[in-house]
């Protein structure tokens, strides 16, 4: 599967780092957070980071920003949706509900959780949504749903 558009939800330490690496790989990415101001600040931190997170700072515009209330529609076009919000299961469950209502068929959904077991993360998903594969990356642990 070709990943051409990615949405990262949560633009903190991990979400902004993931967005920066996608930008380095020339993959357009949108960072969504509670407010667009938070995501804008995250993009600015990526731009000013030392040592630099970006290989080529002129590519910063490949990182779009928005918020989960006004801009969630972008999820409908994404090939990969990465959840990187705070480590709170209630918040993650709410985000998954929105993601799974909006994602296109076949889009990959991942969690960047550091400690919540797959069973707990996925307890509100349907059997179809629960088809899980786990993928360990060099960045951190991703729990991924795909079909
Ligand atoms: N920091 C690490 O070293 C590390 C390593 C591995 C995994 N993780 C995991 O990655 C995830 C994110 O951690 P982090 O360190 O980046 O946290 P962080 O606190 O730096 O960022 C979390 C972001 O989530 C946003 N957020 C909160 N509720 C939201 C919502 N409902 N919708 C959209 N955005 C929301 C916050 O505004 C914040 O920008 C957590 O699950 C954490 O356990 C963190």
Image (cartoon, rainbow, N blue to C red):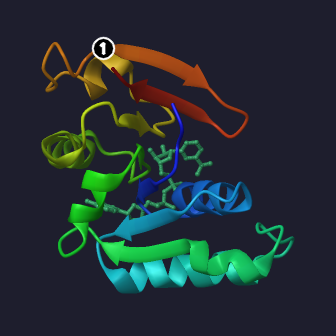
Q: In this image, 60 relative to 111: left or right?
A: right
Q: In this image, 71 relative to 27: left or right?
A: left
Badge count: 1
Q: In this image, 83 relative to 121: left or right?
A: right
SS category of the residue bearing label 1: loop
Instruction: Name the residue at 39% across, 45% down.
Output: 87
Among all residues in the image, which is located at the extreme right? 51
Answer yes or no: is residue 28 visible. Answer: yes
Q: In this image, 102 relative to 19: left or right?
A: left
Instruction: Name the residue at 51% across, 35% down.
Output: 114
Rendered image quadrant of residue 42 = bottom right
Give the answer, above or below, for where 90 lies relative to 55: above
Give the answer, above or below, for where 99 lies relative to 126: below
Q: Position of residue 92 (x, y in %)?
A: 27, 44
Choose between 126 and 78: the one closer to the eye: 78
Give the answer, above or below, for where 147 lies relative to 15: above
Instruction: Name the residue at 19% across, 39% down.
Output: 100
Instruction: Name the residue at 57% across, 54% down.
Output: 14
Give the answer, above or below, for where 63 lies relative to 93: below
Q: Position of residue 6 (x, y in %)?
A: 46, 53
**Beta carbon of the mark 1 residue lies under 8 A of ligand 1:** no
Q: Which residue is mark 1?
A: 131
Rendered image quadrant of residue 70 = bottom left
Q: Position of residue 8 (x, y in %)?
A: 44, 56
Answer yes or no: is residue 11 visible. Answer: no
For ligand 1, give the image quadrant: bottom left
- Mark 1 Cα within 10 Å, few/some/many (few <14, many 20+)? few
Assign the C terminus to one quadrant of the image. top left
Q: Position of residue 9 (x, y in %)?
A: 38, 57
């Amino acid at each position: 599967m070709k990943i051409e558009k990615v949405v990262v939800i949560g633009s903190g330490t991990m979400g902004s780092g993931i967005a920066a690496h996608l930008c380095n790989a020339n993959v357009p990415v949108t960072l969504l957070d509670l407010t667009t101001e938070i995501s804008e600040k995250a993009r600015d931190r990526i731009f000013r980071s030392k040592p630099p997170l970006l290989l080529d700072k002129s590519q910063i515009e490949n990182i779009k920003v928005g918020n989960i209330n006004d801009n969630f529609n972008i999820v409908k076009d994404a090939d990969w949706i990465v959840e990187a919000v705070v480590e709170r299961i209630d918040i993650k469950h709410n985000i998954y509900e929105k993601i799974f209502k909006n994602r296109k068929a076949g889009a990959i959904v991942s969690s960047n959780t550091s400690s919540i077991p797959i069973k707990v993360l996925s307890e509100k998903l349907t059997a179809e949504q629960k088809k899980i594969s786990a993928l360990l990356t060099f960045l951190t642990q991703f729990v991924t749903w795909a079909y």
